[in-house]
Image (cartoon, rainbow, N blue to C red):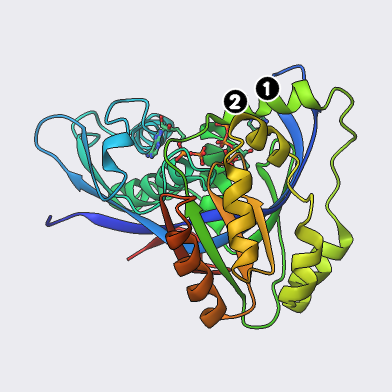
Amino acid sequence: MSGGVTVRVPAKVNVQLAVGGARADGFHDLANVFLAVSLYDEVTVTPSPDRPYLTCSGPYAEQVPLDSTNLAARAAEALASRYGIDPAARNVHIHIAKDIPVAGGMAGGSADGAAALLACDALWGTGASRTELLGICAELGSDVPFSLVGGAALGTGRGEKLTDLEVGGTGFHWVFATADGGLSTPAVFREFDRLTPQAPAPEASPALLEALRSGDAEALAVTLTHSNDLQPAALSLRPALAETLEAGVAAGALAGLVSGSGPTTAFLAADAGAAEKVAEALRDSGTCRSARAATSPAPGARVL
Ligand SMILES: C[C@@](CO)(OP(=O)(O)O)[C@H](O)COP(=O)(O)OP(=O)(O)OC[C@H]1O[C@@H](n2ccc(N)nc2=O)[C@H](O)[C@@H]1O
Ligand SMILES: Nc1ncnc2c1ncn2[C@@H]1O[C@H](COP(=O)(O)OP(=O)(O)O)[C@@H](O)[C@H]1O
């Protein structure tokens, strides 16, 4: 693909997801502690002679919509409209090399939106500032700004207002167990509302932020119990996830939790060797579709 721009973009796990009551606009206020993890999609944008079109490759490709609802296509369109890109120049081929599970609570669609935005920005030379790009990201979705910045951050509001967080030590080792079939994010929030009629205002946990700062995996593990307010809702909609969580902890994980709205489950491990053992045991357990080790924090969207 000559003349194209490729951007690599990470998945995320929410080490804390504190959820308030439903707002008038249908969203929920959050205290969302994001960590970017080393599972990546790559999005390549290439000028196309005729019309804009999308392709996707990788293990989850068949689950990805290849029409104007795709977040990568929406990002390109939003940038082109904002900066008055000539209709002919808007004709791009967007290819997504997908390695992030789809509808898995790992922000894969958001990642592709942020990546396509950055790639089109480089291709078209819009001169948009970082703040302007982050503004477009927030319009595309609550998780999209974090996909652009990566690392570790606290998301407030609906998750789009970011404050960078420090992560000490050499980072954390994770295992991600994917499930067959996704979970709809709005459906999980609706189930949260049903289960939690009086949700308190969401607040980040000082102990969890301190564990991140110190890079102490055992201290972080202690704070992960009940750190995801969407976990009871995801388990209510997908009770079998409890078996995956049990299998990962029985295999030696320091802690296990549902990643965001699920159904991917995330396991914190003491080191790389422990992570490989947990991944292998999870694959053998028959309680998940696949299990993969990854590290955090990972960098945000980057032009390759
Ligand atoms: C739950 C989280 C945790 O990081 O992600 P996933 O685990 O699904 O990846 C996010 O809040 C998802 O963010 P994102 O997927 O960008 O959601 P959006 O497109 O903004 O919103 C989709 C729908 O989710 C619900 N939603 C989302 C964010 C929020 N703070 N409150 C909500 O109630 C609303 O029903 C909304 O219509
Ligand atoms: N580029 C994309 N990759 C994956 N899904 C996408 C994409 N664009 C739009 N979607 C839609 O978004 C839904 C949620 O996907 P995803 O972002 O992977 O999950 P989650 O919100 O659980 O992190 C998918 O079911 C799909 O219909």
Residue 190 is marked as 1
Question: Depth check: 38 or 130 in front?
Answer: 38
Amino acid type, label 2 = Pro
Left-right relation of 208 to 81: right
Whether the residue carrying mark 2 lies under 8 Å from ligand 1 is answered with: yes
Q: Secondary structure at mark 1?
A: helix
Number of marks drawn: 2
Ligand 2 visible in quadrant:
top left
The percent coordinates of residue 28 (x first, y second) are 74, 29
The percent coordinates of residue 105 (x first, y second) are 54, 43
At a point 53% along the width and 29% down the height, the residue shown is 184
Residue 107 is marked as none
Left-right relation of 237 to 168: left
- Residues packed near mark 2 inside 10 Å, few (<14), some (14 to 19) or many (20 plus): few
At a point 55% along the width and 32% down the height, the residue shown is 139
Residue 259 in sight from this viewpoint: no
Please tell me whether residue 236 is drawn above or below residue 170 in the rendered image.
above
Circles 1, 2 touching at the beta carbon (< 8 Å): yes
Please tell me whether residue 200 is drawn above or below residue 266 in the rendered image.
above
Which residue extends farthest left?
49
How much space separates mark 1 and mark 2, taking CA atoms?
A: 6 Å
Which quadrant holds the C terminus? bottom left
Q: Secondary structure at mark 2?
A: helix
Residue 186 is marked as 2
The percent coordinates of residue 278 (x first, y second) are 53, 69
